[in-house]
Amino acid sequence: MTIRVLDIIHQTMADGPGFRTAIYCAGCAHACPGCHNPQSWDFKGGQAVSVEELLETVKADSLSDVTFTGGDPFYQVEAFTELARRIKQETDKTIWCWTGFTLEEIQADPHLAQLLPWLDVLVDGPFILEQRDTTLLFRGSPNQRIIYLKGAPPEDAIPGTVPLVPLR
């Protein structure tokens, strides 16, 4: 199984709290006006990388947690689910995932929802250019939510964090 990957950024601090290995995938149909990464919209962009190779890359960095971004990982949900499952079973790393879908849209679609149990945090919703706010951490517009899917947000939670959302 492969994932179309545009880039892998090691030990980034821009894609979630602390050091992270950020996997930027190819493909996004949301096409949000003002998107900071429009080169990621092409579903044929980047290169195919095996889940096994991505897992080894993630495991090789003992300092970093993991971020799935893009593009939109939910357009490659089967492969990202497999990768996330393996990361959670074989490491103690947290996984943050960015998507243009809302949590409610994902929960309403069993195909998309298969990834949710393996994620720690979901940053959801499309970027809305008219609401752009450069003071926000880890999101571009206030409609985008930082949703903790496992456990409660830390006491020093990032503004915009949503309390624990029980998965159906």
Image (tube, rainbow, N blue to C red):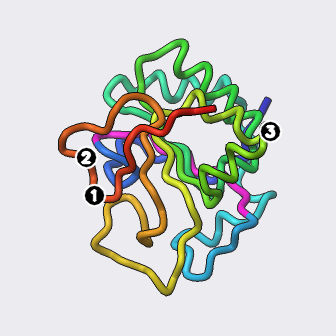
Contact check, label 1 and label 2, Cβ < 8 Å: yes
Residue 25 lies in the magenta-colored region: yes
Relative to residue 163, is residue 81 depicted above or below? above
Quarter of the image where the N terminus is located: top right
Q: Amino acid at mark 1?
A: Pro
Residue shown at 79%/58% (left/top)?
Answer: 43
Q: Indicate the position of residue 78 as horizontal and vertical percent values.
A: 77, 34
Relative to residue 89, is residue 108 depicted above or below? below
Q: Indicate the position of residue 25 as horizontal and vertical percent values.
A: 64, 50
Which quadrant of the structure image shows residue 18? top left
Q: Indicate the position of residue 165 as horizontal and vertical percent values.
A: 48, 39
Q: Amino acid at mark 2?
A: Ala
Residue shown at 41%/18% (left/top)?
Answer: 92
Q: Could you tell me how far apart the alpha carbons at marks 3 and 2 are, in whole angstroms?
A: 30 Å
Compare residues 89 and 24 and report the one nearer the observer.
89
Q: Residue furthest bottom?
A: 130
Residue 157 — which label?
2
Looking at the rendering, the stretch of residues picked out in magenta corresponds to: 18-28
Q: Earlier in the sequence, mark 1 or mark 3?
A: 3
Q: Could you tell me how far apart the alpha carbons at marks 1 and 3 are, in whole angstroms?
A: 30 Å
Residue under circle 3?
Answer: 111
Q: Earlier in the sequence, mark 3 or mark 2?
A: 3
Compare residues 142 and 47 and report the one nearer the observer.
142
